[in-house]
Amino acid sequence: MTVSEAFLLSLGWSDFFQAGFDDKADFVPGRITGQGRGHYQAQVSSEQTLDATITSKFQDAAKDPASFPAIGDWVALRRGEGNTQATIHRILSRVNTIQRKKSGAQASVQMIAANVDNLFIVSSMNEDFDLPRLGRYIELGREPACQTILLLTKSDLSANPAAYVDRFKASFKGVEALVISREDPDSMAVLQSYFTPGKTSLLLGSSGVGKSTLTNYLLGFDAQKTGAVTSEARGRHTTTARTLRFTRWGGLVIDTPGMQEVSAVASNKDLHNDFSDIKDLELLCKFTNCTHKNEPGCALLAALKNGTLRTERWQQYSGETAQADPRRKKNKYSR
């Protein structure tokens, strides 16, 4: 086994992905480790992560957000000039996908991550602990080859952690629940068995439950900012992007922005602090510098027109009033 092959295995490569990869077409395999507006980061070796964009052919063929690369995807890349950039030509077959339905008049989905081995649902032991919402998170993890685990954080701030575990297990038999605290090293060490080389874990939970603190511990350094806990025991929302990174034990972790709701059709109130649906639409715009005013190929304008994105929700995100509806603005655009 070459050094390159060993690294790909540690990144999650397997015979499943190898079977769907055409190495005779001058492609290289890469895994999506970062996602921005109109571009991606794809890791191809231990030394190199390439800035990648999808091809025009890929863009034209994509039918919905699930057709585009997501964090955790393996893709077929072609390197560009300078060997630091690449184009994405194809997504390799997925073992599974974690996605949720998002707001709108028509059913639509938001891609969260792909090829996940462990789904950790993170909840603190305070008013954030809500059994119906935890049940909806559990539904997201009912995918092939995906294990779901509840992580109850901040046990040092709870007078009776066992009571939370009992309430959870009474409702969700068969789903493991772990109680952890950053102040108790032994409780954190039990996570090691899940983060073995080649395994990918996804952290999901509401804002302020301790995901950023947990991610920093798993990585062994402060990669995520953490917010102070308020007098109401709720932390500030600090994570704003999805990333995939190696942990201190060799396994991989995907952190995500906090989600206020995961219901089938989320309300404006539920999604007030989570605009991932709008940010996903921005990735589908034809122009990377799209202002969402009057540009052709603007995915946001299309969603507003067909009703899958409500005007009120767009106004919440943009801070504009009803008179500033982007469908009525006439601004120039550039390529």
Image (cartoon, rainbow, N blue to C red):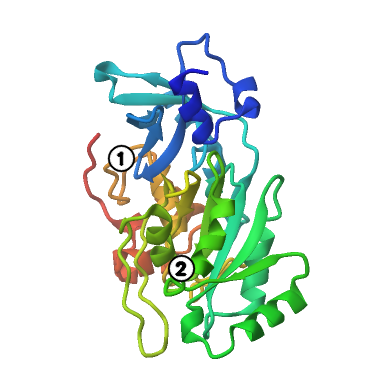
Q: Tell me, for residue 164, which label it has, or none.
A: none
Camera-nearest label, 2 or 1: 2
- Tell me the quarter of the picture where residue 139 sits: bottom right
Question: Residue 272, image x and y in percent?
Answer: 43, 72
- Whether residue 210 sits left or right of residue 51 in the image: it is right
Of marks 2 and 1, which one's residue comes earlier in the chain?
2
Q: Residues within 10 Å of mark 2 (few under 14, many from 20)?
A: few
Q: Is residue 108 visible?
A: no
Q: Is residue 333 visible?
A: yes
Front one among 222 and 83:
222
Could you say which is closer to the camera, residue 200 or residue 142? 200
Residue 95 is situated, as x and y percent measured from the top left of the image, at 65, 38
Q: Tell me the crowding category of disc 1: few under 14, some 14 to 19, or many 20 or more residues within 10 angstroms, Cα based.
A: some
Q: Residue at x 48, y 50 (%)?
A: 253
Give SS at disc 2.
helix
Q: Is residue 203 above or below residue 290?
A: below
Q: In this rendering, is residue 88 above or below 283?
A: above
Q: Residue at 43% of width from left, 64% of height from top?
A: 214
Judge from the rendering whether residue 335 lies leftward or rightward of residue 308; answer left or right: left
Which residue is disc 1 drawn over? 288
Quadrant including the C terminus: top left
Q: In what element is the residue under mark 1? A: loop
The percent position of residue 102, horizontal first and vertical second, equals 56, 60
Residue linked to disc 2: 185
Question: Which image quadrant is residue 234 in?
Answer: bottom left
Badge 2 amino acid: Pro
Q: Position of residue 34 (x, y in %)?
A: 39, 43
Label 2, label 1: how far apart the Cα atoms are = 44 Å
Given the image, on which type of amino acid does mark 1 rest?
Thr
